[in-house]
Amino acid sequence: MKGSIMSSTAVSYETLQQRFAESFQRIAETAVHREQQRELAFEAVRWLREAGFGALRVPQALGGLGASIPQLFRLLIELGAADSNLPQIFRAHFGFVEGRLSSRDPLSQAHWLGKVVDRQLWGAAMAERSGTTGITVALSPLEPGNEQAGWRLDGEKYYSTGTVYADWIAAVALAGDDFVSVALPVTAEGVTVVDDWDGFGQRLTGSGTTRFDAVRVPNEHVIRRYKPDEVRAESYLTAYYQLFHLATLAGIAKAVLRDATAFVKGRTRAFGFPGEASPKDDPLVQRVIGRLSSLAWSAQTQVLAAAEQVQQVFDAEQGGYAEEHHYTEAEVAAFQAQQIIIGQVLEATTLLFEVGGASATSETRRFDRHWRNARTLASHNPAIYRERVLGNYHLNGVTPDQAWLAQQSAGNGVRDEASAV
């Protein structure tokens, strides 16, 4: 990567961990209160913003921290253990940053990544809640025939994760027959952000409605224009976005192990033993804790292994030697990890209650949040479809990209947020 802005001095994971340790600890200490009160995580986001968390992937040459992709996801696992809402809140932000890095456009990088270094954050406005998977939000010229005059954006998005906490919105729209990616301020006239996410888990992610009513979009905020058949061409961003959910799930498994261990150590009653007893000495309880530790280790190991694959694609892109197999290998690794991690973490969130009896269900502890959040995250993933894609790949050599493009050949659906940056 000679001459690349990414070739600056590497930062150690220990240095990054130390930088954010205090913020992560404060987030963990206040997580149950936020969950009990359904108190949006503005304060937690502010702590991370002030610590420069949003600039993790920005190169040191541009004023960022220069973290690698595996370092980012290792930190996200720790953050997910503190509060599983937080990695998802930052998902669109890091996706926007990664899109700028992947573009290798120095002018775009200098402009937009400079704002990231200034601690500005991005939210998402990609998906829509409708009867189809198409896009209805429209970008139209203010003056037909004169695109230089700027644009107007109209329509409504849902699952706008992180937008209530953000300074900017990364949105995707239709301009005629083309897809367009735009960036616009949350405070722009005509933008309305509503916290109406009603899922039983991940309740603090701000994944609700964003409306655009004749929002003016200057030309320089139209970041990308592309045809439907170019939506997924040679991109590692689907795997990258997928890993945010998997890292958060791995963080939940770590939190389950932490909470189960602390709960058992503090108890002086054990089932079947009269009087005072120590559950931590019960072989069956020890077995449960051992299983939880194995599930947490497995989930983290798989996330980091897939993150290494994505890093290899990024390095290949920056070095100018990326080929189709790099993208395929990263996507397959992420999809395979998904198939295992989801089941392991859901097992852990249920197994937690085997060490506590009825007292573990107390709302003062909110242990239920682990299962609710894990189940909600797992539901964001079309796991059964991707399992079939993996089988088709191994049996017939059809790559995930090829399979998706074949399905979309007659439509205009957007696969996920990755296609919009």
Image: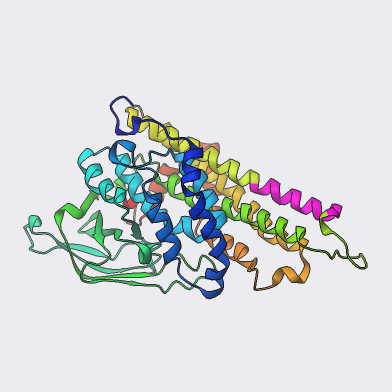
Q: Which is nearer the eye, 160 or 23?
A: 23
Q: Which is nearer the eye, 361 or 414?
A: 361
Vertical comparison of 28 with 209: above or below:
above
Q: Which is nearer the eye, 22 or 228?
A: 22
- Counting the numbered discs, the total is 0
Dominant secondary structure of the magenta stretch? helix
Quadrant of the rendering where the N terminus is positioned: top left
Q: What's the colour scheme?
A: rainbow
Let me know if residue 246 is in the magenta part: no
| Horizontal relation, residue 265 to residue 248: left or right | right
Q: Position of residue 214 (x, y in %)?
A: 19, 70
Vertical comparison of 114 with 325: above or below:
below
| Horizontal relation, residue 10 to residue 21: left or right | left
Let me know if residue 288 is in the magenta part: yes
Residue farthest to the top, as pictured: 2
| Horizontal relation, residue 120 to residue 387: left or right | left
Q: In the rendered structure, which segment of residues is drawn in magenta? A: 281-296
Q: Position of residue 275 (x, y in %)?
A: 91, 68
Quadrant location of residue 187?
bottom left
Q: Position of residue 341 (x, y in %)?
A: 60, 49
- Residue located 22% across and 46% down the image: 111
- Residue located 22% across and 56% down the image: 177
- Residue located 36% across and 53% down the image: 93
